[in-house]
Image: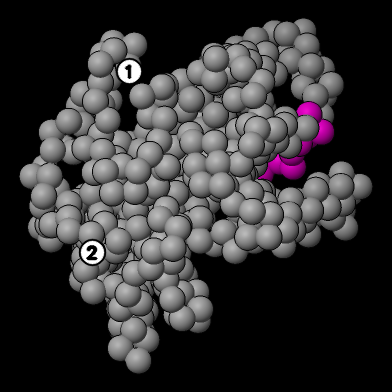
Amino acid sequence: MAAWDRFWLAAGLCLAVTALLEIARLHPPRRLPWWIAHGPAIAWAAVVLIPWLIALRRGYWPVPASPGATVPLTLPASYGFTLLALVGLAGGTAPFLLAGRADPGAASPCRPARVTPKRAFLVIGLLCSLYFMSRGISLSRIWILSTHPGQDLYADSRNSSFLELSITVLTGIAIAYLARPQPPSRTGIVLYVALALLALGSAHRYLVMILVISYLILKNPARAAGARKRGVLTFLLALGALTWLIGFSGLGQLSAVRSGVSVSASGIYGSTLSSFDVMGSAEYVLESGVHPGQLHGASYIALPAELVPRAVFKSKAIPPAIALLTSIFGPIGTSAPLWEEGVINGGAFCDISLMILIGAAWGCLNRRAASSRHQAGRTAAAIGPVWILILYQAFSRILLLATIDLCGSMIIALLLWNWIESAPALLEHRGPRDQAADVGVEELLI
């Protein structure tokens, strides 16, 4: 019963934090959107409470990265650090909620903008080329579902490349495209599905999940299905993808390929939710004898060097947190919550400090987007609740480096999308013949 008591205490703290942040959000006259206030708490609950509830209902908590191992349901080693992380997130976000939106005119809807086809295909072609180059232009690495289960890619950090982030940039551009007030064109839908297939073949399970759910959030295909035939087809595709991801354990199959652990066909369904469980690994690390603050800040001291591409530093070492996990779990690829890096580097102080920093960055950047009159800022605000999915992915990775890579990729995506969508400003300075030519090219795409 003690495990359930701790669970309900954590859930109660999450609800209390949510209520306090809502009060802070409603205080200023120009309030920020709800997803800015509650995004960190929702992402935290998805990382912590959902796998914990599943483990409590099951009666034991297996560790996905260590077959046969279990951790106590009470989480005695990581419980306090986990609650402290939630408090830090709330403390970092609250000041920006109290400040509210800076510009009263920024709440107006995003103006329609025309996509420049030449720029769009140039950016897409360049990013796809960079991604294929990062994979060695190897079909077996671009479509690794054709290989045997258990292929170790997470632990292969020595051969990783920043160029692989190009698929994350493509995902950001695709989400920005969905955030437009206009319905997606036929070409846009084809390119979006192609990106989802590329992420699927490369076993990027989080990107597949984000692409599918983002479409459901931003375009509500069930509502569009009654309006046009294209909406019906897109709705069926999205519904089929979601059914495969959940009902037939598609995410579990991707996890089996990426995790480095061979899973039988009969056990693939049980690995779906377990593969997203990083709390079991966090508890196992601390239970195995790792002490809070053991790394003495080594992860953050090494961070500047880790941001330099391996083409410059050929002999770069594995990040200290990953090296520690590898010494415990072996080279099979595993992760832990983002705040776990703070715990093993500086204990409780570093834990809450890191989460205050993350919460402040979340509140500051999204407040600037919600208060912006620029097209890029308005696009970032229009993406809205989808940012919670991206934050959830960041929380599911132990490395601050991974969060920086993810955030940087999304910022680059917004800047590229702003360049792709800048045609209306250019049309004002061009002749009628040039404007007609641009419109004609775009009609071909639509």
Q: Which residue is more in the foreground, 32 or 130? A: 130
Q: State the residue at coordinates (54%, 20%).
A: 135
Q: Which amino acid lies under the numbered mark 2 shown in the image of this protein?
A: Glu
Q: Which residue is mark 2?
A: 287
Q: Note whether 51 is above or below 383 in the view shown.
A: below
Picture coordinates of residue 54 (x, y %)?
50, 74
Q: State the residue at coordinates (59%, 64%).
A: 270
Q: Note whether 35 is above or below 117 in the view shown.
A: below
User: What kind of colouring is applied to the model shown?
Assistant: one colour
Picture coordinates of residue 29 (x, y %)?
35, 65
Q: Is residue 183 magenta?
A: yes
Q: Note whether 331 is above or below 367 in the view shown.
A: above
Q: Which residue is more in the foreground, 6 or 214? A: 6
Report the disc number at residue 309. Answer: 1
Q: Note whether 152 is above or below 387 in the view shown.
A: above
Q: What residue range appears in magenta?
A: 180-189
Q: Is residue 160 magenta?
A: no
For the C terminus, the quadrant is: top right
Q: Residues within 10 Å of mark 2 (few under 14, many from 20)?
A: some
Q: Residues within 10 Å of mark 1 (few under 14, many from 20)?
A: some
